[in-house]
């Protein structure tokens, strides 16, 4: 299928940003101090993570992307701001002097992740309240809102954001975290993965059982749609009276980190371009199939997606 023009698609992304750092090296021996590999680091790399990776994915497809979040008054926050500029993302990053910008440091040896170290703290209430004021202003210039929740505290006012977007008639897509889904009430689309959905709805024995649980949650939270991403089982979209399934693409999986970011970013861009939700899911499934073949948090370009379409 032909892809629409994404140049006029305007996407606002709000959520928890982080900086993904990679240390690449060779493993030649085991440490004499402990039974762990010794990695001789030869190369380092930084990439946007969390909501910043969602923004990066949306921008890679050619959309006009705005990002609203909170970072610390630190070197990692400045690095994230520079990375967003490089990705052509309009980033409004509130500074919190009491916050350490979330950093995920991954040590890679022989193309495999050996270790991950996380640095993070929670943002202050005052900074988050100021961010909410910016949300109202930025909402006017968006076609679609994506709320990227990584459970780091940046979406403390998510209920108010959804209400503002609803009043403005802007679709709201939310990538959830934790077991309190009441906070996502009245969103347009929720995109839990299989494990996240099971944590909230419980286990299921069949697709019919899964459909009942999905429809029950969709009605309970007054969602227009619910999309459950199911890893090797593909993804399933639940709307009132409709269930649509997309099987996973048969390809070698190299790294699943960031695949959910790619899915919701592609959905947001497609919907902002006026594409039907079922078609948007089809393309998001294609994008996910591409990105899991890449190392670390990666993106899919419009050209790659066109080849898969």
Image: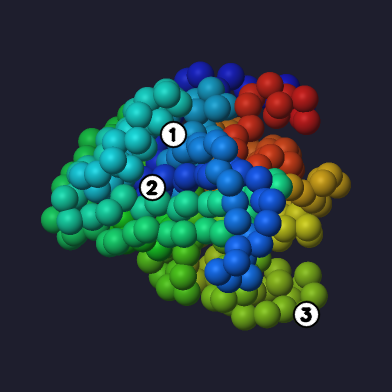
SS at circle 3: loop
Q: Residues within 10 Å of mark 3 (few under 14, many from 20)?
A: few
Q: Residues within 10 Å of mark 1 (few under 14, many from 20)?
A: many
State the image coordinates of residue 19 (x, y, percent, origin top left): 42, 45
Choose the circle earlier in sequence order: 2 or 3: 2
User: What mark, if any, has residue 17 been given in the picture?
Assistant: 2
Seen at 72% across and 58% down, the residue is 231
54 displayed left or right of 15:
right
Q: Secondary structure at mark 2?
A: strand
Point out residue 260 in the picture as x, y percentages from the top left corner: 59, 50
Image quadrant where one finds the C terminus: top right
Rendered image quadrant of residue 6:
top right
Q: Position of residue 134 (x, y in %)?
A: 22, 40
Query: Which mark, by number, is residue 298?
Result: none
Tell me the tag on residue 205: 3
Indicate left or right for 22 with 139 as reference.
right
Residue drawn at x 42%, y 24% is: 86
Label 1 sits on residue: 11
């Amino acid at each position: 299928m032909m892809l629409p023009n994404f140049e006029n698609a305007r996407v606002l992304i709000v959520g928890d940003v982080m900086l993904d750092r990679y240390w690449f090296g060779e493993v030649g021996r085991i440490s004499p101090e402990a039974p762990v590999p010794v990695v001789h680091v030869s190369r380092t790399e930084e990439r946007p993570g969390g909501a910043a990776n969602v923004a990066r994915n949306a921008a890679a497809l050619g959309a006009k992307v705005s990002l609203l979040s909170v970072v610390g008054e630190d070197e990692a926050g400045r690095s994230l701001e520079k990375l967003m500029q490089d990705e052509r993302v309009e980033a409004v990053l509130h500074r919190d002097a009491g916050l350490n910008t979330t950093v995920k440091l991954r040590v890679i040896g022989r193309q495999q992740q050996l270790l991950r170290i996380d640095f993070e703290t929670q943002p202050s209430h005052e900074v988050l309240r100021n961010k909410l004021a910016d949300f109202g202003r930025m909402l006017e210039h968006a076609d679609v809102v994506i709320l990227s929740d990584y459970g780091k505290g940046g979406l403390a006012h998510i209920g108010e954001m959804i209400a503002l977007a609803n009043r403005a008639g802007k679709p709201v897509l939310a990538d959830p975290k934790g077991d309190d889904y009441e906070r996502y009430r009245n969103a347009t689309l929720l995109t839990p993965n299989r494990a996240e959905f099971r944590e909230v709805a419980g286990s299921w024995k069949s697709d019919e059982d899964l459909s009942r649980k999905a429809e029950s949650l969709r009605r309970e939270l007054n969602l227009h749609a619910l999309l459950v991403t199911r890893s090797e089982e593909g993804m399933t979209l639940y709307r009132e009276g409709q269930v649509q399934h997309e099987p996973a693409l048969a390809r070698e999986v190299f790294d699943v980190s960031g695949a959910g970011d790619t899915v919701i970013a592609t959905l947001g861009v497609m919907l902002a371009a006026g594409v039907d939700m079922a078609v948007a899911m089809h393309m998001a499934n294609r994008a996910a199939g591409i990105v899991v073949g890449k190392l670390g948090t990666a993106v899919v370009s419009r050209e790659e997606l066109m080849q898969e379409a």
